Amino acid sequence: NLVTGLMVMFAPLALIAVIAMLVKPHFGILGIMFANFFSIGISRYVSLPTGLMVDGFLVITLIGVFFMQLNTKVEWKNASRDITYLVLFWMFMTALQLVNPETVSRTAWFYAMRSMALYSVLVVPLVYWIYNKFKDMMAFINITGIFTILAILKGVQQKFIGPDPWEQAWLEIPGNQTTHVLFGVIRVFSFFADAGTYGGMMAYFAVFYLVLAIHLKVSAGRKFFYWLLSFGSFYAMVISGTRSAIAMPFVGFFIYAFLTKNFKAMFITGMFLLFAVFILKYTMVGESYYEVRRMRTVFQTDEPSLKVRQENRALFRKYLATRPFGGGVGSAGNWGLRFTPGTFLAQTPTDGWYIQVWVEQGIVGLVVYLFMIGYLVAKSAFLILFKIKDNNYRFAAIAFLSGAMGMIVSSYSASTLGQMPGTILFFMTMCFISLMPEWEKKQLTI
């Protein structure tokens, strides 16, 4: 048995990794980042619950932090911040769904609440306790860059060489086949959950690394690496065939121009956006390319999938009119199909992260969630505009927020913000921005 043999062979390495995370929790953060990117892709090759890798690394890292207290004083009060309280309250709201009378499956709640609330409530304190220095943020940027390069290369392989046998088996699952092979052309998904998540994350990295490449004071080799990541990510976004990701670079660049107070860049971005809309909506330029044809459908009001989305949302409005707390966490989407097949919420696609939050937690939950996201964005923007003065910190913060705003906008029709790796990346970067005034203050006192 190949899988069993590989598990036995790598067991010692796994044990060493666990010990390293317990002794030095910084390694645990690296493990969390690795699992955040690769656990879903690995699940296509082995019949194991690899999605729980993130949970395992989070728990091991938390235990390591408590062990670390024996030798090094952990400043527990560092986690006593507004972001921590926000994610704790959101976790409390999600936990209350266990007593929602509409909830059909508590098992589905356990699986669904992890990316919805648990990961953020565990990651945020960990960043403030042990991953709270400028060098940690730079390590995060560079390691994420390596993972992004691998994601781009995997997508290019699927596009030009074709999916491997395991990916092909995943594609042949009925739901995946109809959404990822359109008119004989594959929508690449790399090692992410689906093409939508892949396209959204690649759009995020295209904006993120472009801002860093332009402004961050690093070596020439590092700048070239960031440029490569930005252009490679943009290309990967295009070949994913993800329509919801198209707006992300425009939103990101507009936010970048606003935060840098570069009104000329805002004007150029706006004009380029209008030009792109004109080309896609009123001309047939590039029609011979599938990716261009795919993007063009965004502007077709009679496009069949758009009509289906509108019909589904009308059904949800009727269903939720008497259910202010929704139908229960895990009742919709993939977890609904897995644990409560045949139910109305499981059978009706949400087609968007905010729609899923609304369906599962009702209008009350959606308002709380949007308040949390809005607060984090507003606070980050305030710090960038009025508090952070050091250019290296400021432009890193602008890169984080510009990419995040694209992710936030795309999540109306995709699951970018509620799916790995988007969830953990978003909350980690918001924590880094909140720490920057403190890093700057320490620099001045030194």
Image (cartoon, rainbow, N blue to C red):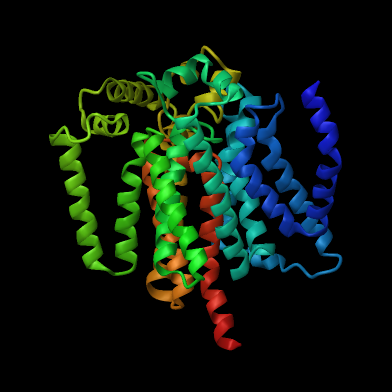
Residue drawn at (78%, 53%), measured in percent from left and top?
21
Above-or-below relation of 170 to 76: above
**In the image, is 129 to the left or to the right of 289?**
right
Where is residue 143 shown, x and y percent of the image? 60, 55
Residue drawn at (47%, 59%), measured in percent from left and top?
226
Where is residue 111 shown, x and y percent of the image? 63, 31
Q: Compare residues 273 and 340 and report the one nearer the observer.
A: 273
Would residue 362 be seen by someone viewing this image from the given angle? no
Q: Compare residues 358 and 254 and report the one nearer the observer.
A: 254
Total labels drawn: 0
Q: Quadrant of the C terminus?
A: bottom right
Above-or-below relation of 270 to 196: below
Above-or-below relation of 61 to 391: above
Quadrant in which residue 288 is drawn: top left
Q: Compare residues 66 and 25 and report the one nearer the observer.
A: 25
Quadrant in which residue 29 is drawn: bottom right
Residue drawn at (40%, 51%), measured in percent from left and top?
231
Q: Quadrant of the N terminus?
A: top right
Which residue of the protein is positioned furthest toward the left in this rendering?
282
Residue drawn at (65%, 50%), measured in percent from left and top?
122
Q: Compare residues 350 and 268 and report the one nearer the observer.
A: 268
Where is residue 95 shown, x and y percent of the image? 61, 38
Would residue 285 be seen by someone viewing this image from the given angle? yes
Which residue of the protein is positioned furthest toward the top in this rendering?
342
Where is residue 66 shown, x and y percent of the image? 80, 58
Above-or-below relation of 207 to 41: below
**In the image, is 295 to the left or to the right of 8?**
left
